[in-house]
Amino acid sequence: MQTGGQLKMCLWCFSFAVTSLEPIIGQYGEMLKIPCNSGAIKAEDIAITKWKYVSHTGDQFATDEYKVRVSMDKNSSLLISAAKLSDQRTFTCMVVTGGDVFEYPVNVLIHSESELAEKLSKCPHANPPANITWFKNNKPLEADGKGISIKVSVVVESSTGLSTTTSTLEYSAMKEDTGARFKCRADGLPLESSSMNFTITYSTENIMLEVSPQKELKEGDNLTLKCVADGNPAPTSFNFHLKGELVTVENTDTYTIANVSRDATGEYKCSLTDDTSMEATRNITVTYLDINLSPSGNIVKRAGEALNLSLQIDSSGKAEVSWTKNNAKLGKQPNFTKLGYSDSGRYEWTVTVGHITRTASFDLTVEGPAVVKSLFKNRSNDGQHKVLTCEAEGSPKPAVSWSINGTVLGESPFVNGKITHKIKVVPSANLTVHCTVTNSLGNDSRAINVSSLIEEVRMDKQDQSEDSDQTRLVVGVIVGLLIATLVIGLAYWVYSKKSK
Ligand SMILES: *[C@@H]1O[C@H](CO)[C@@H](O)[C@H](O)[C@H]1NC(C)=O
Ligand SMILES: *[C@@H]1O[C@H](CO)[C@@H](O)[C@H](O)[C@H]1NC(C)=O
Ligand SMILES: *[C@@H]1O[C@H](CO)[C@@H](O)[C@H](O)[C@H]1NC(C)=O
Ligand SMILES: *[C@@H]1O[C@H](CO)[C@@H](O)[C@H](O)[C@H]1NC(C)=O
Ligand SMILES: *[C@@H]1O[C@H](CO)[C@@H](O)[C@H](O)[C@H]1NC(C)=O
Ligand SMILES: *[C@@H]1O[C@H](CO)[C@@H](O)[C@H](O)[C@H]1NC(C)=O
Ligand SMILES: *[C@@H]1O[C@H](CO)[C@@H](O)[C@H](O)[C@H]1NC(C)=O
Ligand SMILES: *[C@@H]1O[C@H](CO)[C@@H](O)[C@H](O)[C@H]1NC(C)=O
Ligand SMILES: *[C@@H]1O[C@H](CO)[C@@H](O)[C@H](O)[C@H]1NC(C)=O
Ligand SMILES: *[C@@H]1O[C@H](CO)[C@@H](O)[C@H](O)[C@H]1NC(C)=O
Ligand SMILES: *[C@@H]1O[C@H](CO)[C@@H](O)[C@H](O)[C@H]1NC(C)=O
Ligand SMILES: *[C@@H]1O[C@H](CO)[C@@H](O)[C@H](O)[C@H]1NC(C)=O
């Protein structure tokens, strides 16, 4: 059905359940009893029971044929007195219950010599004439003189007085009516048709070009173009315009370009093959990033030299750069105008554009000949030995050697081209001690005078003996004074004895 076309529906608005029963056999001239539904429906559920039959002569039916001979019992059975051969026909019992109409046709055979062959047919009837209401998606429809018109016809069968009501809905279908469900219902009667749904066709009104990946298309990605168009039936073939190149696809709405390159940036379109005016356009950008860091790999430089870095970025957008040295972040790009040993390490350069990240790196080794930076001596607190310290610089790691035999106290870790070496010595004579440092690039030596520790100790002892002489002197003076005092006292005692 085209949009705006007429959707014509015609329903009787009844559903019939037809059950065939065994024929009833009656005897000519006797009472004929025709049961209605053999108890399939309970008497209390039945709203209306009607009996009908098909005349032998079609339309020309004698209305009074059964007028005086028929009656109905409590069980809805049809009773016909004085059965005739002409009673041999199909009687149909119509039962209206709470939800439906059931028909039970019963074939009646009257035993006699002549058998009448009859063509039997059935026909739906409803009485009284019903009001029929139409519904779209369970909402009632009313004739509006424009898109919706409802025509009702009632046919009354003269022989039975039963009527057949036919309601015809003419509905101008719109695109939005796709999948809508229509039904009709007889007012006042528990009768309802089952829902029907119609296919409504309409031509494409909207077309869109969808691009995947949606967020960012990177160089190397697979680009999928999807042409999304409405219409019923949906279009099955599309034209894709790839930067001017035309590709037509059948039975699919997608087109994929694998491993796109930066050249794929440009304008893309899709359109209907049968209506190229229905077209959608998208500008597609492929992001890309190339970096070049020079030098790279392992770089060996002499201390004091300069290292020029050459950094090149070719990208589709603004790049963010960062540096690390030995995996630790650097605040800014390293500047190697005068290389020191501490500049040695692994440098990594990271550049990001959109979702693309590239890194480049180099390993820098700064080397130089071994040099003695300082050499000094310290006397231990107890004066028992001396400690000599030699500080060296250079890379590769300098080897330190001494011109004196001593006990090595230790060597510091080799950091940033520096190393410190200590020895403990007990010199027995005044000496000149050399510290010599050597690596593959050169050597250096420095000297220091170390005085004899034994000499110093002897001097200390001399100092101590002088002290004891003084003590003896003091003791001697005191003893002398005591003797003198004693002599004077004795002389005074002898003198006073003599004078007495
Ligand atoms: C109605 O049917 C019931 C059960 O089938 C039966 O017992 C009863 O006699 C019937 N009544 C008449 C009037 O035929
Ligand atoms: C049918 O509809 C008409 C008008 O809407 C109303 O007058 C009439 O009573 C209805 N008949 C039944 C059986 O509902
Ligand atoms: C309408 O019918 C079609 C096909 O018969 C079916 O796919 C669709 O689900 C139906 N729609 C509704 C609302 O029932
Ligand atoms: C692109 O598609 C190919 C095959 O269709 C697949 O092997 C590849 O992994 C896809 N590439 C990406 C980046 O998804
Ligand atoms: C993608 O294309 C580039 C050149 O454009 C090529 O070097 C690369 O091998 C391709 N990758 C795949 C997976 O085909
Ligand atoms: C695509 O880009 C072109 C030129 O760069 C521009 O004229 C056009 O309007 C763009 N189209 C869309 C859909 O953005
Ligand atoms: C390093 O760069 C400076 C100035 O940019 C230049 O004068 C010098 O020659 C460069 N040295 C090397 C080794 O490229
Ligand atoms: C590196 O440092 C020198 C001076 O120390 C300066 O003149 C030069 O501009 C710096 N270069 C960079 C790239 O920062
Ligand atoms: C060792 O001597 C140097 C100077 O010769 C001095 O600077 C340093 O503090 C001394 N160290 C100790 C532990 O006495
Ligand atoms: C160091 O000791 C060794 C023996 O252990 C000896 O041959 C050598 O002459 C000594 N060197 C010095 C400088 O005292
Ligand atoms: C050692 O040197 C000291 C001065 O540093 C000096 O007084 C002493 O005489 C010297 N001893 C010898 C044995 O040369
Ligand atoms: C130290 O360097 C000089 C030249 O600078 C060289 O003649 C000498 O052999 C070197 N000595 C050692 C132990 O490497």
Image: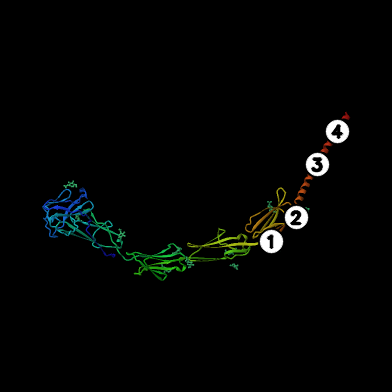
Q: Earlier in the sequence, mark 4 or mark 3?
A: 3
Q: Are marks 1 and 3 in contact (CB under 8 Å)?
A: no
Q: Secondary structure at mark 4?
A: helix
Say what amino acid the circle numbered 2 marks: Leu
At a point 79% along the width and 43% down the height, the residue shown is 468
**Residue at image mark 3:** 472
Q: How far apart, in angstroms, are the residues tagged by discs 1 and 4? A: 86 Å
**Residue at image mark 1:** 443
Q: Nearer the viewer, residue 86 or 469?
A: 86
Q: Earlier in the sequence, mark 2 or mark 1?
A: 2
Q: How far apart, in angstroms, are the residues tagged by discs 4 and 2? A: 65 Å
Q: Name the spot of residue 77 as percent of width and height, x first.
A: 16, 50
Q: Name the spot of residue 27 as percent of width and height, x first.
A: 13, 52
Q: Secondary structure at mark 1?
A: strand
Q: How far apart, in angstroms, are the residues tagged by discs 2 and 1? A: 22 Å
Say what amino acid the circle numbered 4 marks: Leu
The yes-or-no answer for disc 1 within 8 Å of ligand 12 is yes
**Residue at image mark 2:** 431
Q: Earlier in the sequence, mark 1 or mark 4?
A: 1
Q: Secondary structure at mark 2?
A: strand
